Amino acid sequence: MKYNFDKIINRKGTNSFKWDAGEILVKIGYADKFNDETIPLFVADMDFECPQPVLDALRKTVDQQMFGYTTQMTSSEYYSALKNWFKRRQNWEIEDNQIIYCPGTVHALIMAIRAFTKPDEKVIIQQPVYAPFYKTVVDNGRTVVNNELLNDNGFYTIDFNDLEEKAKDEKTTLMFFCSPHNPVGRIWTKQELKKVAEICENNNVILVSDEIHSDLIRTNETFFPIADVSDLQNVVVCTAINKTFNLAGLHCSNIIIKNRLLRAQFQKELGMKSPSPFEINALISAYNEGEEWLEQLNEYLDENFDFLEKFLTEKMPKVKYRRPEGTYLAWLDFSDYNLPEEEIHKRIYTDANVILQDGKAFGEKCSLFQRICLPTPRSIIEKAMNRISEQF
Ligand SMILES: Cc1ncc(COP(=O)(O)O)c(C=O)c1O
């Protein structure tokens, strides 16, 4: 079946955070205005229909006509769908008992902090990075230590000397690792993964590898899971159908923990949580039958990145940008305009009436960056980019 990612679907009136929460965004100062003409490209969810098999499975779930307590534990289909996906796509063998369902990946980060660290301990993150990596640590009363990524002309790498120094600190007991990386778009090489895994292992730092962007990769790129380079004895891997299949509203994450002790600690903190009937059926259909859609999606995303690249080269050559290897996010550096961050923000959010995400949300040093999410029909991206370029 051929999917049409150009199709525009009106999401207003669906309680969409991206399209309906304008008033809240203005109230919290995230946006200056939000009206019928606003184009929101800030939330990392997609404006595309889910794969047909997933829609069918969800409709079938409604036909059950009742939605009592459910458990995935009696569903061998749930486990086999998940295991087969990772075996087929990443050559990673997972066992049933290593899989813990968790209602959302951010929730898993919070559980990891509470399960594996004490209040006076430190957690390593690598900014610029997805804002909740910082916020979950601070909100839970732990200390963030930032192993800032190195930016070489838009290509980001890891400062391993600094990472090792920070990991050596006895108070450092956990690391949040984003792989592929939001927002810089890197897919880490096996060598890079190996070094991160070794540094953590040698210094008794538990490594949480958030791999929820691992299915969203550019053609000709290969994603390597941390499982390729580590025996996973001190590793927790976050997986989810949320990003891959545009199912974030279902909050269906699965956390893979091989080490029995770590698994028990995590499970104790999490308590007994079960996926809803919608999540169970969505996961089974997505992992068993969603691959055709995903391949077409990645091709469409490639073309969105082609479009953005050409647009920036022709109309906004001062914006520094490098095509990401993974994710559907573009990380735009406006520093060559020599404008203060407030002026960049005003021109985009107020004058162009487009909502992106200010770089400072990802780290202190990123105030002149903007992140744009590209999983949206090209005509919408084109309209947004035209409006932005007219302001610069
Ligand atoms: C790296 C990363 N982790 C987690 C999340 C959120 O995941 P969830 O919706 O499963 O909580 C996002 C969303 O953008 C993300 O980019």
Image (tube, grey):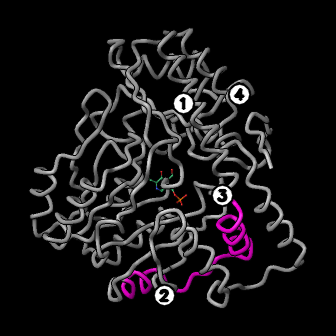
Q: Between marks 1 and 3, how big is the CA–CA gap?
A: 21 Å
Q: Between marks 1 and 4, how big is the CA–CA gap?
A: 27 Å
Q: Which residue is mark 4?
A: 35
Residue 26 in view (yes/no): no
- Which callout, 1 or 4, points at the residue further toward the start of the chain? 4
Q: Nearer the viewer, mark 3 or mark 2?
A: 3
Instruction: Report the front residue among 345 and 65.
Output: 65
Q: Label 3 amino acid?
A: Glu
- Asked if marks 3 and 2 touch (Cβ < 8 Å), the reply is no
Q: Nearer the viewer, mark 4 or mark 3?
A: 3
SS for dot 3: helix
Residue drawn at the location 46% of the way across and 76% of the way down: 93
Residue drawn at the location 22% of the way across and 38% of the way down: 150
Q: Between marks 3 and 2, how big is the CA–CA gap?
A: 25 Å
Residue 89 sits above or below residue 2 on the image: below
Q: Which residue is mark 2?
A: 97
Q: Which residues are magenta?
A: 263-290
Residue 305 is labelled as 1
Residue 81 position, x and y percent, is: 63, 74
- Which callout, 1 or 2, points at the residue further toward the start of the chain? 2
The quadrant where residue 125 appears: bottom left
Q: Dot 2 surroundings within 10 Å: few (below 14), some, or many (20 or more)?
A: few
Q: Dot 4 surroundings within 10 Å: few (below 14), some, or many (20 or more)?
A: few
Q: Label 2 amino acid?
A: Asn
Residue drawn at the location 80% of the way across and 44% of the way down: 13
